[in-house]
Image (cartoon, rainbow, N blue to C red):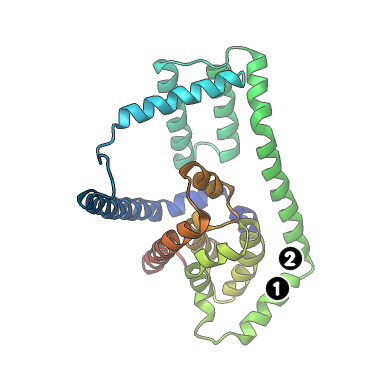
Amino acid sequence: MAVTVISQDPNSIWVHLIPIQGVAAVLVLGIAAILGWSEKRRIAKLQASGEFVGTTEVNVADIAADFQNRQDEIQEQKGYHFRKGRAITIINIVLALGVLVSLLSGLLPPAPAFLIATTIALVLNFASADDQSDALKRHAPNALSMAGVILAAAMFLGVLNESRMLEEIALMLVAVLPEAVGPYLHVIVGLLGVPLDLLTSTDAYYFSVLPIVQETVATYDVSGMGAASALIIGNVIGTFVSPFSPALWLALGLAGAQMGKYLKLAFPIAWALSVTMVLVAFFTGMLV
């Protein structure tokens, strides 16, 4: 979505954000370790008081096997037919790594890279043309829906740009903003990315907020890449605390949890993580 707004190659933005992705991975693992340690202490206290009867030992292998068995049953019921086996799994992993290498090296643009990989994956994993066609039909609606959103957004932004409305909005903001704040507007919005995701959908955030911020900070010689990076880094964590996210509702349903209790625990953590990532990116020069 951000690519459509700033007219950049998707691969360029992804490569630009790889360092902060590494920082995020370390922070997420640290948060997971702290939460796990805290939960282990809580369960130990309940066991000591007699309020909880059970064990803290978990057999991961048994859980994984049970999950796989249930997945196989669901796939069988729905009539999914595809090749299985260690060799196919290894080839799929190699194919995925090949796509990543292609994107990182710039050997191919993202669109042909994914098209070629999809074609190879279909031939490898599905024995017949009918099975390949069924797989495409299952996933085509989501892809076409996203393509429609991108095309509609591009037309909307084209109207705003060519009519000079976007420029006028940006000039109005520059006129009312304190001079010291203007060059850092993208950083400020990035710091507020998580709470903003509670109020807006992802489409609204990138297709309404980002164009105005980008046009505004451009008057202070901030690049489109810098503006987009600030908003992406600040907002991406918000997906997992946003009531507009279908994936979040699915996860809560599978866990048997409630949205209110989840937000009470997760929102401060997500916002703190988001703010930390934006500040790291800012002080390392990624947002200029």
Given contact means CB atoms under 8 Å apart, are the residues at marks 2 and 1 in contact?
yes
Q: Quadrant of residue 88?
A: top left
* Category of crowding for the residue at label 1, using alpha-carbon neighbours closer than 10 angstroms: few (below 14), some (14–19), many (at least 20): some
The residue nearer to you, when weighing 100 against 278, is 278
- Mark closest to the chain's N terminus, 2 or 1: 2
- Expressed as whole percent of the image width and height from the top left, the position of residue 50 reads 24, 49
For residue 214, above or below residue 19: below
- Expressed as whole percent of the image width and height from the top left, the position of residue 80 reads 59, 19
Q: Which residue is mark 2?
A: 161
Q: Residue at x 28, y 36 (%)?
A: 58
SS for dot 2 = helix
Question: Mark 2 to mark 1: distance in Å?
Answer: 7 Å
- What kind of residue is marked 2? Asn
Q: Which residue is mark 1?
A: 167
Q: Quadrant of residue 269?
A: bottom left
- Expressed as whole percent of the image width and height from the top left, the position of residue 113 reads 55, 34
